[in-house]
Amino acid sequence: MKTIEAARNLTPTIKRPTRKMVYWRTIEIALLDGRSPLQIKQSDYEQAKRELTGVSDLDLQLEILDQAG
């Protein structure tokens, strides 16, 4: 999957998001949806990660399976 490879090989001028950045974006998404920071959902995390990296966990898992098979 070329999209995943491109996301991994970001140019030096673009910083990869840290876990903390993903965490804070996850909280923002929960707040925008009218929930407290203690009520974050897995879908909030997945959306935050997708927004900040352009890649989801599912994409990475599918790439690993493709390489193994």
Image: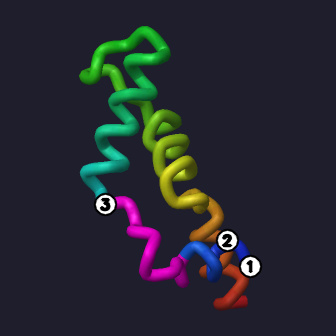
Tag 2–tag 1 contact (CB < 8 Å): yes
Q: Secondary structure at mark 1?
A: loop
Question: Marks 2 and 1, how far apart in space?
Answer: 9 Å
Between residue 57 and residue 50, name the one nearer to us. 50
Quarter of the figure with residue 55: bottom right
Q: Residues within 10 Å of mark 2 (few under 14, many from 20)?
A: few
Between residue 41 and residue 53, name the one nearer to us. 53
Looking at the rendered structure, the kind of residue marked 2 is: Leu
Please name which of the two marks, 2 or 1, marks the residue nearer to the observer. 1
Whether residue 5 sits left or right of residue 46 in the image: it is: right
Q: Residues within 10 Å of mark 3 (few under 14, many from 20)?
A: few
Would you name the residue on which mark 2 appears?
A: 62
Question: For the point 59% across and 70% down, which residue is it?
Answer: 61
Q: Which residues are magenta?
A: 8-17
Looking at the rendered structure, the kind of residue marked 1 is: Met
The picture places residue 63, in percent across and down from the top left corner, at 66, 77
User: How many circles with numbers are drawn on the protein?
Assistant: 3
Please tell me the numbered disc located at residue 18: 3
Quarter of the figure with residue 28: top left
